[in-house]
Image (cartoon, rainbow, N blue to C red):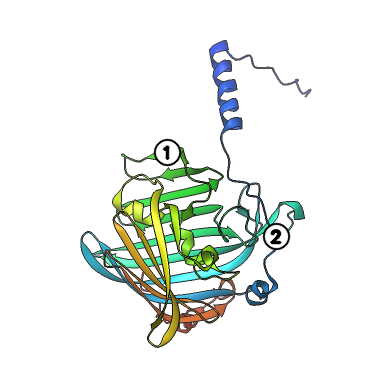
């Protein structure tokens, strides 16, 4: 049976115009940031962070929700990995050309707590190039948030680039729904979610070892809880030498309208965040730390490694 050549479909003019306009809109839609990559990180950084493992630290957590302090657990997971500078997506196949490959330090901050009958599960991921481009060391190129509870779930991500950050949100709340926007911001602004990397001073002093003031983009989770738009605010960070349970620490006090948070970072390597407290009543206290290739510990019995970071078997 002979094959007939494919028929050419002629679109009505209004529909053809709509298709062309849509393609042009997609082609010109701003994409993720393509940050400049600066000088390579100091060798000491890779001696500590190039061992193919992640640093996991478990914390006791008290966090306010619906006007009541809630007890929970938190894990900070720091690990280096390669990303594609064109998309800021992980090079999981390992075949990315060298000119597009950017080593980043990734932080996953995982919170779990319960509000009455139902649990919250919140994860914020921060992706910061190891060899920094503009601004402060470990300035992020991408921050994303997922939050789940029994009412529904939310995804929010931002991509800082120059004097703007692109924001994309998908929410089960009709007042938010699916939304994208670009927000103007000082190109040297800090992002609060990335401070849990930056104040550890893993590749040189934060803010040159001095106090800092300027524009700051608050945490995605903080604005999520308040259901307000994510916008930069004026902020200050003051540092001092102090002690926490007899351990010498660098104490950083972050202040901006409506918020004060105090972080204690051990002065000695590996410069862990020993804990923090906020004016809203949030308190995080370190339990234990371990370096593990956790992605290999997914077989039956792997749960025993939770004890190395001070956590018990998962309940939910």
Picture quadrant of residue 112: bottom left
Residue 301 visible in the displayed image? no
Mark 1 closeness class: few <14, some 14–19, many ≥20 residues within 10 Å: few
Q: Position of residue 209 (x, y in %)?
A: 52, 68
Image-based side of 227 in relation to 40, left or right: left
Q: Is 210 in front, or is 134? A: 210
User: From the viewer's perspective, is residue 98 above or below residue 228?
Assistant: below
Q: Is residue 145 left or right of residue 159?
A: left
Figure check: 308 above or below 68: below
Of callouts 2 and 1, which one flags the residue occurring earlier in the amino acid sequence? 2
Image location (x, y in percent) of residue 233: 38, 49
Q: Residue furthest top?
A: 13
> Which residue is found at the position 31% from the left and 48% from the top?
227
Which residue is outermost to the bottom?
246
Residue 149 place in picture, x, y as percent = 33, 57
Note whether residue 198 is visible: yes
Q: Check disc 2 and report the residue beneath it.
A: 39
Question: Residue under circle 1?
Answer: 179
Q: Write down the quadrant of residue 49 in the picture.
A: bottom right
**Proximity of marks 2 and 1: CB atoms separated by less than 8 Å:** no
Quarter of the image where the N terminus is located? top right
């Amino acid at each position: 049976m002979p094959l007939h050549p494919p028929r050419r479909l002629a679109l009505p003019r209004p529909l053809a115009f709509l298709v062309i306009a849509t393609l042009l809109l997609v082609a010109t839609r701003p994409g993720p940031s393509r940050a400049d990559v600066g000088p390579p990180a100091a060798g000491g950084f890779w001696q500590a962070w190039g061992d193919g493992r992640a640093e996991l630290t478990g914390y006791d957590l008290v966090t306010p929700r619906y006007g009541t302090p809630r007890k929970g657990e938190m894990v900070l997971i720091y690990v280096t990995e390669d990303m594609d500078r064109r998309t800021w997506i992980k090079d999981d196949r390992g075949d990315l050309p060298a000119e597009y490959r950017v080593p980043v330090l990734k932080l996953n901050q995982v919170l779990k707590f319960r509000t009455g009958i139902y649990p919250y599960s919140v994860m914020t991921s921060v992706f910061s190039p190891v060899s920094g481009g503009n601004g402060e060391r470990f300035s992020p190129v991408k921050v994303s948030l997922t939050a789940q509870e029994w009412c529904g779930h939310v995804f929010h991500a931002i991509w800082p680039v120059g004097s703007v950050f692109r924001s994309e949100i998908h929410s089960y709340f009709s007042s938010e729904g699916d939304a994208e926007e670009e927000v103007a911001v000082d190109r040297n602004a800090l992002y609060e979610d990335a401070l849990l990397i930056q104040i550890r001073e893993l590749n040189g002093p934060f803010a040159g070892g001095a106090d800092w003031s300027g524009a700051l983009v608050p945490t995605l989770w903080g604005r999520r809880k308040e259901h307000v738009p994510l916008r930069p605010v004026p902020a200050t960070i003051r540092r001092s030498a102090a002690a926490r349970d007899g351990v010498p620490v660098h104490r950083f006090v972050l202040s901006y309208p409506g918020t004060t948070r105090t972080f204690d970072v051990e002065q000695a390597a590996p410069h862990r965040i020993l804990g923090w407290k906020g004016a809203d009543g949030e308190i995080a206290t370190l339990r234990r730390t371990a370096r593990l290739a956790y992605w290999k510990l997914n077989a039956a019995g792997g749960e025993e490694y939770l004890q190395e970071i001070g956590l018990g078997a998962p309940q939910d």
